[in-house]
Amino acid sequence: MGRSIVDKSVMFLLAILVLALLAFFVMISALRVDPIEKAINEGRIIKTAIIFERNGKPAATQLMMYSSKTKRAVLLDIPSETGLIIKSINRMDSIDVLYKPSAPQAYLEEIERLCATSLDYYLVLNERSLSTFVDLLDGISVFLPNPINETADGKAVSLPSGFVVLDGSKVLSWAGYKDPYMPESEVVAKRQILLQSILKRLSEKSDYILGKKVYPKVKPLFKTNLKEKSLFLLLKEYSGLNSDRIVLQRLSGNPRNVEGKQLLFPHYDGDLVKDIVKQSLNALISPEISAGAIADKVFTLEILNGTSVRGLAQRTAEIYQGFGYEIISVANASSSDIQRTSIVNHYGDEAAAKTVASVINCREVVNESSQTSPADFVIILGRDFNGRNCVY
């Protein structure tokens, strides 16, 4: 009789313990906040690699740095042919050799090392899912400066000039076509325009795309490390972004042939792209400098070489292009013996001028109104400039 009472008591205690544990886990689950929701609530920067995959390789990779506080974003283009000494395979090669469609982690880790920043998430669209997504958006609008009547991958590509709306199949044709005479800067611009156009259309069609009927068709299109709720919240957050205000930046470098393969080696052993990312993140975080660095317009620059070093202005132009500035003129200054580098501020925004100067660590900023200069800022390089920074 006593044993039966003990057994019942033990069973009762076990039942209470199980219920307590269940209640504890339910409470923990209720308190657990979605990481995207938490980042938005805290106004943090969300760093996402957005990859367009073609034939199992990254045709375009954009590092999107987005401030949930200011609703501003920076896109940094990472070419798949970026050349590095890749330690994991112990050889010099392009970073795309690390890419595996089912497991892009090694590829993304190399991008993290290259940019000296962590990546929170990744979104991958392959050709089929990209085409389907564009069709769900009812097409995207892009501007084509010239008509295209060529063949790419054995398929005819025929598109008119001007603003055109491309459906999914035409997007694949346009994205896959590469004019052999197109400058590399325009190739990069096309990759970024594609993502910009998708984000703009997402903003216009957000209620439809994120609605209960259509979103179940959208979520399987993305390969991602985000959970279902997080993906929805991120796409919703991106839909509130003004795509016209996205700052476009790119990794610039020196092309070199390595064992029959054309690779792009980042300028200054990768230090420049690290500086681009660092300045972008600081600008997104700091309201006092965001007006200059993350602006509503693309600032125009004129770069003048005031030294006897040949090609210095052109190399400096490549640095500023990487930071998203538009170079309208590269020329020689009135003298080739200028001692100190200076920034002439025609635009009138002191914060923006300081941001321009900080790219090359220049301390000399001169405010000078001009009715004739087409450039917002004129950079006059002096003998204190070593090709990357002013040395004092």
Image (spheres, rainbow, N blue to C red):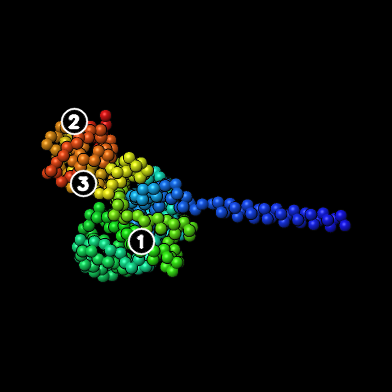
Is 210 displayed left or right of 151 in the figure? right
Please provide percent x and percent y for residue 330. Answer: 17, 44
What amino acid does circle 2 point to? Gln
Q: Quadrant of residue 349?
A: top left
- SS category of the residue bearing label 1: helix
Furthest-top residue in view?
Answer: 392
Residue at mark 2: 339
Front: mark 2 or 3: 3
Q: Are marks 2 and 1 in contact (CB under 8 Å)?
A: no
Tell me which label, 3 or 1, sits earlier in the chain: 1
Tell me which label, 2 or 3, sits earlier in the chain: 3
Residue at mark 3: 300
Residue at mark 1: 202
Q: CA distance from mark 2 to mark 1?
A: 51 Å
* Residue 185 in view in this figure: yes
* Residue 256 in view in this figure: no
Q: Quadrant of residue 279?
A: top left
Q: Give me the disc on residue 53.
A: none
Tell me which label, 2 or 1, sits earlier in the chain: 1
